[in-house]
Image: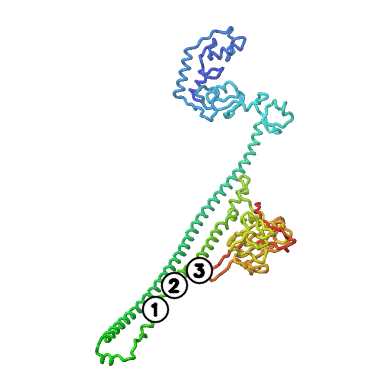
């Protein structure tokens, strides 16, 4: 409720015609006050002058003068209102009062009859004069008026789903179902309440999904950090083991060098003793030779005396000389070559193992991750979020999405009657292959060719168009397969091959290295043709066993598998047959 000051202000300092503050207030003979312009305009619109409030006839239009005392009272109250009275000025975005002059106060209610908004002081004056329908303050009141009939929009046409006035029912909406706006509003609000309820459920579900995903990521981060620490520890232990064996190897070589030096020192001591004895004997002989005492010379040195060159110390001398001649070969070449060879084999095996491990870690979980999180499934299944990952509908679709590889034919491995296109995608029967290499190992007796790409882990998949070939061959072989065999290789030879004359358009080949499977599919029929299981891709070699005992790594050797392609022909009827490696189509 307004304060006493506000009531006094409304009753005494507001013009009852414009409902605003008095401007040049004048008094009528009946004692009522009006703005000079307001009462003048009011009288000009009528034939006889009368008071707008009490309806008293005033005869001829009286001459009006500004009531200076009353004006002072109005100004006094205006100053009081400006200095202290409670007021709420309309802020940007709020509905202002249409009656207030600057500053405009915040509107308290909007009248749907007057199509105007009123602040609390002006609203009391409005209620005293008229009993109109009031609502919470709204802007753009002109949107609530029918543009055609200039009437209030009071009804809602269900047929055309739009707001109409009463006149519209007799015009453009004749015979349509219309209800009051309030009823339509309640019905629409009920619908929106149901929608918001569903949205709230979706919001809760999505929030839970976000929480689960964040929790999953956090656990994954922790697990990854633990794995990295363990891997670093394992590799550090491996490096420490290599350094340990390096120290032992260096110590063994140094010990061998010490033994050689000790043996050489012992032999040198004996040789120096022999040299001293020989030198002393030689001096004695030279002294006797120079003597002129013939009798002494002849009696002490018989005629058949000779120098004995078979001193006991001479035999080790030959041995040590032979040993010293072999030292350069043993110390600089023998040990170095042995170390180079062994380290090279270990490095090659370790490199293959690490490449396989990196490829496996990078690709093994790329397609399984989306299905592992229940939260992600909920998000993609909900209509409010776009689907970011398509759930495969069958095994072939899973293969297409995750394991496709791009292959290129290796012309250096092609037999002489097969030709490879410039882009390395088409294999044709006829002519001779124009590419030769000193290091080439082509198939000598079989119409085969290998791909350039090899795989030693994980899963891979490719497609081949065989519709232009009467008898074709597809599969995989190990990297060291014998290419001079006369007959089609078998799994025992290290090859898993499908050889058929079926009229198929496109064949899909899928290899699972870890599970030892090679599968062939008909693309158009989306059916399996044949599958090799239990394939012995992995091998165990003595070298691997040695490495595993030294470095603690796996003793399993993983040779590379190369896709193999072939065209059988009788050199006449099949001339021009071809196979084409096609891009893998995404579902």
Quarter-of-image position of residue 247? bottom left
Q: Nearer the viewer, residue 388 or 577?
A: 577
**Distance of mark 3 from mark 2, alpha carbons?**
27 Å
Q: Residue furthest top?
A: 60
Q: Nearer the viewer, residue 168 or 82?
A: 168
Can residue 514 be seen at all in this image of the molecule?
no
Q: Which mark is residue 320?
A: 1
**Mark 1 falls on what kind of element?**
helix
The residue indicated by pointer 2 is: 329
Question: Residue 213, how many percent across, how many down?
Answer: 55, 51
Question: Residue 255, how many percent across, how many down?
Answer: 39, 73
Q: Which dot, 1 or 3, sits closer to the camera?
A: 1
From the viewer's perspective, is residue 422 above or below residue 141? below
Binning the other alpha carbons within 10 Å of mark 1 as few (below 14), some (14 to 19) or many (20 upward) gives: some
Question: Residue 452, how many percent across, how many down?
Answer: 60, 59
The residue indicated by pointer 3 is: 547
Question: Residue 150, how many percent across, how many down?
Answer: 66, 23
Q: Residue at x 59, y 22 (%)?
A: 130
Q: Nearer the viewer, residue 91 or 64?
A: 91
> Is 542 displayed left or right of 143 in the figure?
left
Mark with earlier residue (3, 2): 2
**Distance of mark 1 from mark 3, alpha carbons?**
37 Å
**Distance of mark 1 from mark 2, alpha carbons?**
15 Å
Colour scheme used in the picture? Answer: rainbow
> Is 165 displayed left or right of 22 in the figure?
right
Q: Residue at x 63, y 52 (%)?
A: 391
């Amino acid at each position: 409720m307004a304060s006493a000051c506000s009531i006094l202000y409304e009753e005494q300092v507001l013009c009852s015609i414009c409902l605003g503050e008095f401007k040049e207030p004048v008094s009528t003979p009946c004692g009522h006050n009006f703005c000079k312009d307001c009462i003048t305009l009011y009288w000009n619109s009528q034939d006889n002058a009368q008071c707008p409030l009490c309806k008293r006839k005033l005869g001829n239009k009286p001459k009006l003068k500004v009531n200076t005392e009353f004006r002072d009272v109005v100004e006094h109250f205006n100053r009081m209102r400006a200095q202290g009275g409670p007021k709420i000025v309309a802020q940007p975005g709020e509905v202002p009062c249409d009656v207030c002059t600057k500053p405009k106060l915040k509107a308290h209610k909007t009248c749907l009859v007057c199509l105007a908004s009123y602040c609390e002081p002006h609203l009391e004056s409005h209620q005293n004069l008229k009993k109109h329908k009031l609502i919470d303050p709204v802007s753009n009141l002109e949107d609530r008026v029918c543009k055609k009939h200039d009437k209030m929009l009071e009804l809602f046409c269900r047929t055309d789903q739009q707001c109409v006035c009463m006149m519209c029912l007799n015009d453009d909406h004749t015979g349509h179902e219309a209800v009051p706006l309030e009823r339509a509003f309640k019905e629409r609000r009920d619908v929106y309440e149901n929608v918001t309820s569903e949205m709230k459920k979706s919001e809760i579900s999505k929030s839970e999904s976000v929480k689960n995903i964040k929790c999953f990521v956090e656990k994954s981060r922790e697990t990854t950090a633990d794995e990295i620490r363990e891997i670093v520890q394992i590799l550090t232990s491996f490096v420490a083991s290599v350094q340990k064996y390096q120290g032992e190897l260096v110590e063994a070589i140094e010990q061998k060098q010490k033994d050689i030096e000790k043996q050489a020192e012992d032999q040198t001591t004996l040789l120096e003793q022999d040299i001293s004895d020989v030198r002393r004997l030689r001096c004695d002989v030279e002294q006797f030779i120079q003597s002129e005492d013939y009798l002494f010379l002849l009696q002490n040195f018989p005629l058949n005396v000779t120098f004995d060159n078979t001193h006991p110390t001479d035999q080790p001398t030959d041995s040590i000389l032979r040993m010293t001649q072999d030292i350069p070969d043993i110390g600089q070449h023998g040990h170095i070559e042995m170390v180079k060879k062994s380290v090279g084999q270990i490095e090659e095996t370790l490199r293959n193992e690490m490449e396989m491990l990196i490829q496996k870690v990078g690709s093994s979980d790329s397609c399984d991750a989306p299905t592992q999180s229940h939260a992600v499934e909920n998000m993609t299944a909900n209509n409010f979020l776009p689907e970011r990952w398509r759930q495969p509908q069958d095994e072939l679709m899973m293969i297409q999405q995750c394991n496709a590889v791009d292959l290129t034919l290796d012309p250096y491995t092609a037999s002489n009657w097969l030709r490879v296109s410039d882009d390395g995608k088409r294999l044709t029967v006829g002519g001779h292959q124009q590419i030769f290499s000193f290091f080439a190992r082509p198939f000598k007796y079989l119409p085969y060719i290998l791909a350039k790409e090899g795989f030693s882990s994980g899963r891979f998949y490719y497609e081949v168009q065989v519709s232009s070939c009467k008898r074709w061959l597809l599969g995989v072989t190990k990297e060291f397969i014998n290419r001079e065999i006369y007959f089609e290789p078998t799994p025992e030879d290290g090859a898993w091959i499908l050889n058929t004359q079926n009229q198929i358009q496109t064949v899909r080949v899928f290899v699972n290295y870890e599970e030892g499977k090679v599968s062939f599919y008909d693309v158009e029929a989306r059916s399996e043709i044949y599958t090799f299981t239990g394939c012995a891709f992995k091998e165990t070699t003595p070298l691997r066993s040695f490495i595993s005992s030294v470095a603690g790594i796996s003793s399993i050797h993983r040779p590379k598998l190369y896709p193999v392609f072939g065209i059988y022909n009788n050199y006449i009827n099949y001339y021009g047959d071809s196979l084409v490696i096609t891009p893998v189509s995404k579902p």
